[in-house]
Image (cartoon, rainbow, N blue to C red):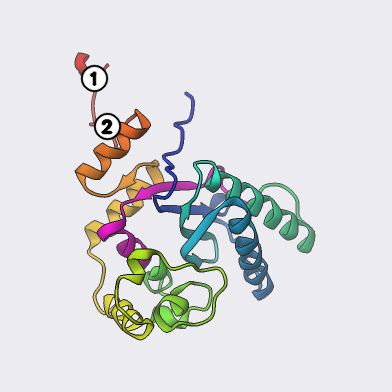
């Protein structure tokens, strides 16, 4: 069965997950994270992707980015993935694949889902029990988005900019979002959409994307399709 084409639309944010093969580690030392972020900055600029949020976990990566072209995401992930695998194989004297097949992705409606997705991404280390607070985790965009820490990888999305009229009010408003836990239903929706290559958003948003792309962007109904659906 052929793989479904990715649901990527220029200008609309996409949530990306890339996992280590068999859930095995893909980062082993501090330099690994630093090199990955250096190349993420380089190749996102070359491919035409604006990175709004990220987290580098031990065995997988989350990115939230806006592509300028439909091909921008694939180009970024191909160049970044290949460069990093070459580095890891050379550094640790290994061979073979590092990543688990294709990266997973979903389109994200900007309001209100984009900031929900940013929280989902930057709270990953807390949900994993690695830290008590997201600002304790070094390898994410939280410090840039919440505390204005210099981070050349991150480009704030206009929805983030609309949180306040000054940078200080935006930072305070963003930190305030993290005082409340994400609803489990939101977490489940983001996970399912990303793993299935669908969209996260309202029914209207899903219908608009489906009309633009000319194909289904939500999971089909379980069971045998009716004659009308065939």
**Image x and y of residue 30, in percent:** 65, 75
Looking at the image, residue 225 lies above or below residue 68: above
Horizontal side of 27 relative to 186 (left or right) equals: right
Residue that mark 2 sits on: 220
Q: Position of residue 221 (x, y in %)?
A: 23, 31
| Residue under label 1 | 229
- Asked if residue 130 shows in the view, the reply is no
Magenta region includes residue 115: yes
The answer to whether 76 appears left or right of 131 in the picture is right
Give the camera-side residue of 39 and 59.
39
Eyeballing the image, is 103 above or below 178? above
Query: Sequence-wise, which precedes: disc 2 or disc 1?
Result: 2
Residue 191 x/y as whole percent: 35, 52
Is there CB contact under 8 Å for labels 2 and 1? yes
Q: Residue at x 46, y 57 (%)?
A: 65
Instruction: Give, as a single range, the part of the protein colored magenta.
Output: 98-118
Q: How many marks are shown on the rendered structure?
A: 2
């Amino acid at each position: 069965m052929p793989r479904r084409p990715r649901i990527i639309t220029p200008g609309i944010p996409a949530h990306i997950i890339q996992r280590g093969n068999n859930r095995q580690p893909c980062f082993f030392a501090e330099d690994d994270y630093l090199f990955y972020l250096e190349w993420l900055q380089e190749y996102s600029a070359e491919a035409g992707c604006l990175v709004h949020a990220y987290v580098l976990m031990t065995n997988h990566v989350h990115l939230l980015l806006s592509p300028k072209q439909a091909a921008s995401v694939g180009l970024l992930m191909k160049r970044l993935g290949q460069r990093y695998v070459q580095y890891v194989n050379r550094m640790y004297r290994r061979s073979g694949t590092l990543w688990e097949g294709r990266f997973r992705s979903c389109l994200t409606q900007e309001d209100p889902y984009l900031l929900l997705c940013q929280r989902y991404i930057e709270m990953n280390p807390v949900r994993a029990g690695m830290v008590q607070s997201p600002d304790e985790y070094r390898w994410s965009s939280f410090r840039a988005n919440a505390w204005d820490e210099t981070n050349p990888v991150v480009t704030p999305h206009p929805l983030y900019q609309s949180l306040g009229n000054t940078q200080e009010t935006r930072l305070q408003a963003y930190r305030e979002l993290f005082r409340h836990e994400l609803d489990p239903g939101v977490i489940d929706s983001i996970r399912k959409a990303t793993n299935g290559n669908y969209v996260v958003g309202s029914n209207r948003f899903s219908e608009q994307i489906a009309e633009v792309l000319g194909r289904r962007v939500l999971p089909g109904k379980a069971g045998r399709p009716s004659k009308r659906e065939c």
